[in-house]
Image: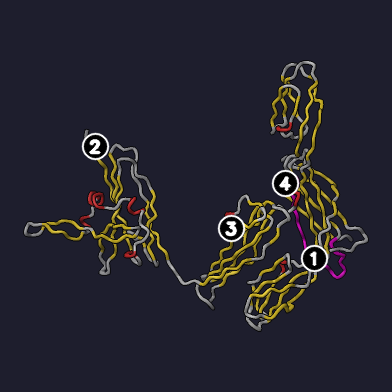
Amino acid sequence: MTTYMRRAIYIDNAPLSCAGNTVDGFTLDGVQPTGTDRRIIFAVDKEDGTKKYVKLAVASGTATEAELKVNKATTSGATEETAATASDITADYVLSVGNTVIELGAVTSIPAWVGKNVYPIVALIAPEDSASAPTLRLGIKTTAGVDQYEKTEESPAYALADEDVDVITVDANVETAGGAACDVTVRFYTSGAWGDYMKLTEVKNIRASKAQFKARYQVTAIGSTDSAKVKDAVIVYAASSAKVSGQTAEIITQTKHYALESDGQGLQFAQALIVHDKLRDAKIAAYAAFRAEPKTREMVQVATGDGKEQTVKLSDTGINHNSIKMQVNGVPYWGFGFNTETNELMFTADKGAAVTASYEYGYEDENWQPMEAVSQQVYENGTYASRYNYALPTTQTGKTIVDVKYELLRPTGDEKDVLLGTGTGDTQLFVLPHAARKDTITCTGKWTYNDDTRQLLVQADKGTEIKISYHWVAESQKVHAVAAGWAELG
């Protein structure tokens, strides 16, 4: 039986540019079913404006051009080998001499193509009755190198908690101009040891008690318009020690620098609202903390530059590290670090330069006061809105900073020898009031338990008391929204 073959040739008139310092091989994709083939040659621009047709000879990853030849008859009737031209490029010719995909996949460098335009020519062949045809997607990898100046800077180690806590997200706000770039990485102190630096996007399922950032700045020219800085870095993590035990989570809101009118009393009242699913054993508590306005320092001189990295301990306490701004000879300076544990600034300034800092200090510690639960409303979608109020005692003056904290509590408990009913000899259904941990259940008779529905199926002898003991853990709360408001009292 004769098998007929289908052939196709693809000649790309749009070139692949090899502009760059190096040509580093190919990107290749597609399929080659059994009984099919894919071959590739290339047309390359010559200096005289014509093209030459080549395949690649590969040795240890480096490819060199091998110009393609054909035998043509001369006027005398003899044959001679000449360079292939456009009229010689057919599907059969490419299939007979072209590179395979495996050969091109081994290429890591093509020095002869740097700065040139290249035109791939692809030939495909498959049996006429084949259900699948070969495919190919091809690209060229190049590297464009430029001179770059690089500086790496580490932040202080920031304490998250006394024990390892869950890190939820990490993000950095980077500002660049011109051809500058800035990469920020982070590492964590977990179980008493520092880990390796990782990209911020790689932070997943991390538990840690400390974190440290590293910024790598790159510019293409010194003294140019290139600039790069890290404006801030933010770690969202479960902050409380109770959270570590899995029993409590916290949500905290804050208002600060409330503008006092000339006759104003300051903030004296707080109200909190939290929208959540129906609670069975779980509980929600709300707290408020009122604090006075912090003090400020404006461009206070902290040091004189010596051309080297310096560390200066600030005498003020309760410093808000997010408020710190530094200046060198009156010009804003961003390349500083601040250690919240030791109250120290780290910076480098030219010899003799005046180093000043502006910041807020004297922040009071939070003194959390329980808020009163005043109402609960059920919405049409089945969610609940719980409202809480707190007013400062009349003996205290109003404040300008107020925090509201919601505690999502998951209590636990034990039930011991609870009488469910009397056995009938048949299977009976009971719904437990709490979410029992299945591995702690002891129950009369034969039983099965559904964690999702809290349904217990029991088969006990007729007339036997059915008793159960178990340990339970409250359900996890689902919070849909929170809001907080503050006000003066007239």
Observer-side mark, 1 or 4, equals: 1
Q: Quadrant of the C terminus?
A: bottom right
Q: CA distance from mark 3 to mark 1?
A: 34 Å
Residue at x-position 75% and y-position 72%: 314
Residues 131 and 238: in front is: 238
Q: What amino acid type should be assigned to the residue bearing mark 2?
A: Thr
Q: Give whichever of discs 2 and 4 has the lower sequence position.
A: 2
Q: Nearer the viewer, mark 2 or mark 3?
A: 3
Q: Residue at x 72, y 17 (%)?
A: 426
**In terms of secondary structure, where does tag 2 sit?**
loop
**Residue 363, numbered circle:** 1
Q: Which residue is mark 2?
A: 3
Q: Residue furthest left?
A: 76
Measured Cα–Cα span from mark 1 to mark 4: 30 Å
Foreground: disc 2 or disc 1:
1
Q: Circles 1 and 4: CB distance less than 8 Å? A: no
The disc placed on residue 479 is: 4
